[in-house]
Image: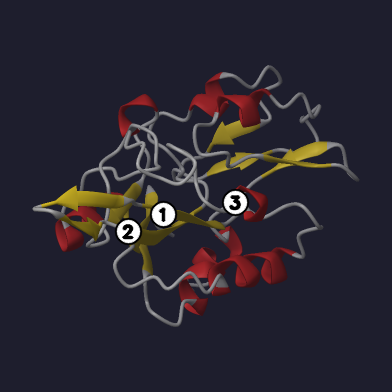
């Protein structure tokens, strides 16, 4: 079993097909409205006057995101019933028997990972496909990616393999929770905090995530 599992995402090869989202929903039989892995599109640009003419700087790229099983998970700190917890393997999970559906974890998480199950009246989230890890298998999202944009492994080993990359827009600053996530920037990536997106700092497809 992996210790401190982490995800790696290569934004430069992701085509936004959402196969990872579908695989996650299928594996966990998630109800409508709940997607533990989501694919956000960040796009924008404009026409710029230059040397008596005009040129454009239009860009678009995708980010596949789920729970990052953070080093310092703020969702765990803010859960009043201790339903949200980080186990000995570094996986952040929710104990449905202790969850009262208060949404504190959802409101705290800068990545929007915890999501409310209306039918069960409890919060839910990615568990890193714990059962697959115990069988030595890759999480469903990683295994399903046709472009091999996703990878997984122990956090320190992934850093050695891929290096440590800076955060890109529209992701939040990592210093708040220290996410176990490494993102390979897209060649058109904008820096964290950029307001060049069509909706400013927001993603272009909020209805899909």
Res 139 seen here: no
Disc 3 crowd rating (10 Å Cα; few below 14, some 14-19, many 20+) is many
Looking at the image, the residue that sits furthest to the left is: 51
Q: Quadrant of residue 140?
A: bottom right
The span from disc 3 to disc 2 (Cα, nearest Å) is 33 Å
Under circle 2, the secondary element is: loop
Residue under label 1? 43
Circles 3 and 1 in contact, beta carbons < 8 Å:
no
Foreground tag (3 vs 1)? 1
Q: Is residue 199 visible?
A: yes
Taking 119 as reference, is 16 above or below it?
below
* Image marks 2 and 1: residues in contact by CB distance under 8 Å: yes
Q: Write the residue at 79% across / 29% down.
A: 101
- Which one is nearer the viewer's eye here, 199 or 48? 48
Disc 2: which residue: 58
Q: Nearer the viewer, residue 58 or 148?
A: 58
- The residues bearing labels 3 and 1 have C-alpha atoms spaced at a distance of 26 Å
Residue drawn at (58%, 42%), measured in percent from left and top? 113
**Of label 3 and label 2, which has the lower sequence position?**
2
- Residue on which disc 3 sits: 126
| Viewport quadrant of the N terminus | bottom left
Q: Nearer the viewer, residue 93 or 110?
A: 110
Residue 112 position in % (x across, y down): 57, 39
Q: Quadrant of residue 76?
A: top right
In the image, residue 62 sits, relative to residue 50, either above or below, namely: below
On the image, the x and y values in percent for residue 98 come to 77, 30
């Amino acid at each position: 079993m992996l210790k401190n599992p982490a995800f790696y995402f290569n934004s430069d090869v992701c085509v936004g097909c959402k196969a990872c989202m579908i695989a996650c929903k299928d594996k966990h039989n998630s109800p409508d409205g709940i997607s533990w892995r989501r694919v956000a599109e960040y796009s924008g640009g404009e026409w710029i006057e230059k040397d008596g003419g005009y040129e454009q700087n239009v860009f678009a790229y995708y980010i596949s995101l789920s729970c990052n099983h953070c080093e310092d998970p703020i969702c765990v700190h803010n859960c009043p019933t201790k339903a949200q917890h980080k186990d000995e393997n570094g996986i952040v999970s929710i104990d449905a028997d202790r969850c009262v559906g208060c949404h504190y974890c959802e409101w705290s998480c800068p990545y929007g990972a915890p999501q409310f199950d209306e039918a069960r009246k409890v919060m839910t989230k990615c568990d890193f496909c714990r059962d697959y890890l115990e069988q030595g298998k890759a999480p469903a999202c990683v295994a399903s990616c046709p472009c091999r944009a996703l990878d997984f492994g122990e956090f320190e080993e992934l850093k050695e393999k891929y290096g440590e990359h800076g955060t890109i827009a529209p992701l939040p600053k990592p210093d708040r929770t220290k996410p176990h996530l490494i993102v390979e920037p897209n060649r058109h990536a904008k820096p964290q905090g950029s307001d060049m997106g069509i909706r400013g700092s927001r993603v272009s497809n909020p209805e899909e995530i």
